Amino acid sequence: MELKKFIRDIPDFPEKGIIFRDITPLLKDAEAFKFSIDSLSEKLKDIDFDIIVAPEARGFIFGGALSYKLNKGLVPVRKPGKLPYKVISEKYSLEYGEAELQMHIDAISKGQKVIIFDDVLATGGTALSLKKLVEKSGGEVVAMSFLIELSYLNPRKILSNDKIISLIVY
Ligand SMILES: O=P(O)(O)OC[C@H]1O[C@H](OP(=O)(O)OP(=O)(O)O)[C@H](O)[C@@H]1O
Ligand SMILES: Nc1ncnc2[nH]cnc12
């Protein structure tokens, strides 16, 4: 299935000069959504790992479905002030600004093998901050996976030692 036809390009959103890759057409198409999850699961199924870490908000959609499909737990990483227990935080920059993510201090146990999942890999800032949160907790990131990779932004440069698995590459 040609998944790119379910991704809509929105120029100048949320800022001038950004081409926003809108996944909502893919999500509302049952076959395309299912095909995305099945294809990603196929790529990840032979990796030895314990748990998926995914960030708010679009990361939850895919992270949740993949956790179910691969029979693994899910750690939700959230924007500040949303998680109810004690948190660790990371500030970072992304394609269109600055942000901060938080994870519960007891979400990852020492030595746990983690796959980071997000919908879009753009500059890699979000993925790097997720990795820092996992490593601060004593976990090990064994792979990072994405529905969409924007290779023209060179995200692999700052993630040079990581195994990166993307389904759709621009
Ligand atoms: O590689 P980067 O340059 O860091 O960009 C990628 C991130 O940007 C988007 O998240 P956003 O913070 O816009 O949040 P959302 O999922 O809540 O829309 C996207 O879902 C990724 O998490
Ligand atoms: N160009 C883009 N489209 C959609 N999500 C993004 N997250 C960061 N950059 C993005």
Image (spheres, rainbow, N blue to C red):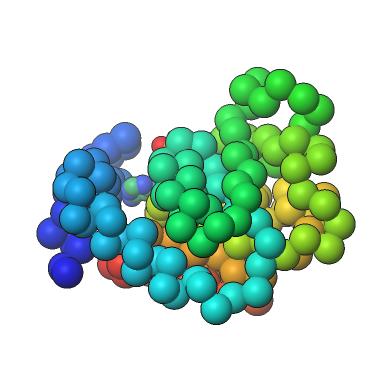
Q: Quadrant of the C terminus?
A: bottom left
Q: Please give the name of the residue rendered at 43% of the width and 67% of the height, measured from the top-left corner.
A: 41
Asked if residue 164 is positioned above or below residue 85 in the image, the reply reads: below
Q: Quarter-wise, where is residue 96 in the image?
A: top left
Residue 125 seen:
no
Compare residues 25 and 69 and report the one nearer the observer.
69
Residue 32 vertical placement versus 16 (above, below): below
Q: Is residue 59 left or right of residue 167?
A: right
Residue 86 appears in the picture as rendered: yes
Residue for point 13% across, 59% down: 5
x, y percentage for residue 160? 61, 75
Between 80 and 68, which is closer to the camera in this rendering?
68
Left or right: 107, with 152 as reference point: right
Residue 161, placed above or below residue 136: below
**Quadrant occupied by the N terminus:** bottom left
Question: Outermost residue toward the left?
Answer: 5
Q: Nearer the viewer, residue 34 or 108?
A: 34
Query: Seen in the image, is 61 located left or right of residue 87?
Result: left
Residue 117 lies, in percent from the top left, at 52, 56
Q: What residue lies at 19% left-to-right and 62% top-to-bottom? A: 4
